[in-house]
Image (cartoon, rainbow, N blue to C red):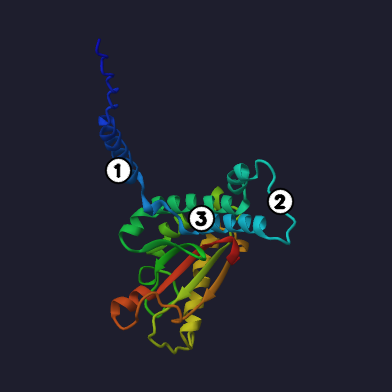
Amino acid sequence: MAKKESKEPAKPSTAWQGTYGDMITLMLCFFVMLYDPSEVDPAAMAQIQNSISLETNSMDDPRGGQSLSTGRLSDLGNSISTLPSVDKGRSLSIARKKAVSIFAPEINSSKITISSDERGLVITLASDAFFEQGSADLNIEETRDVLLKMAKFFQSDELKSRRFRIEGHTDNNPISTERFPSNWELSASRAANTLHYLADFGVNENQFSIAGYADTRPLVSNETKEGQAYNRRVDIIILDEGHF
């Protein structure tokens, strides 16, 4: 009697892999759409990276006497998230979002710009919108409401422990008057007058410092009238911890 041939089991279907791959791709696209790079604060990111670097160096340093105990790596994320520098960075990120919201009309009209760099959060006042050319006297009738909002912002809970610096800048057009022998005096006076008005509106002067840089730190070339106007500015900086 002939033996029946044994049949090989059917191979499992792989059709599900196409559906699974489509689902993963759609999820990736969804999260990419949610990601907004404008919300990533460079100052906060730099502080987080510095915290991670410090933590890593302390583990790798053969002279430090530190060792990896059980659970060290699993606790690393928690220890980093509780570092003071990260808290500072988080508060600065919140302050940026608040500033963008408060000064939206001035940002849209190019009177104010908000940016971040290694110094911290920078609120830039377009000099021509706040001062007459060659003058350090604020156009207070036109800018009172803005300065009041700014003073209130600097007194907010998020900024209670922060330090601020007001920096005056000019273009490269020389000036020589009895009051302002050079652009150094003009830039410093604009910074000082800005602080005086903010103090009149309630800010704590002890949290502030001022500086005048004349035309030594242009943002763009001074070769055009537009560039010169862009370089005439007053920067109010919410200082990062390393720049106090």
Residue with the mark numbered 3: 44
Residue with the mark numbered 2: 67
Q: Residues within 10 Å of mark 2 (few under 14, many from 20)?
A: few
Q: Residue, x 53% and y 57% (percent of image)?
A: 49
Q: Residues within 10 Å of mark 3 (few under 14, many from 20)?
A: many
Three-letter residue code for mark 3: Ala
Q: Is mark 3 on a helix, strand or loop?
A: helix
**Distance (Cα) linking label 3 and label 2:** 29 Å
Q: Do the residues labelled 1 and 2 touch (CB within 8 Å)?
A: no
Residue with the mark numbered 1: 29
Side (left or right) of 90 relative to 115: right
Instruction: Choose top left, top right, bottom left or bottom right for residue 239.
Output: bottom right
Q: Residue, x 44% and y 50% (percent of image)?
A: 98
Q: In this view, does 12 lie above or below 70?
A: above
Tell me which label, 3 or 1, sits earlier in the chain: 1
Q: Is residue 172 above or below residue 40?
A: below
Instruction: Choose top left, top right, bottom left or bottom right for residue 54.
Output: bottom right
- The N terminus is located in which quarter? top left
What is the count of numbered marks? 3
Q: In this view, does 121 lie above or below 12?
A: below
Tell me which label, 3 or 2, sits earlier in the chain: 3
Q: Residues within 10 Å of mark 1 (few under 14, many from 20)?
A: few
- Closest to the observer, 139 or 56: 56
**Distance (Cα) linking label 3 and label 1:** 26 Å
Three-letter residue code for mark 1: Cys
- Closest to the observer, 237 or 199: 237
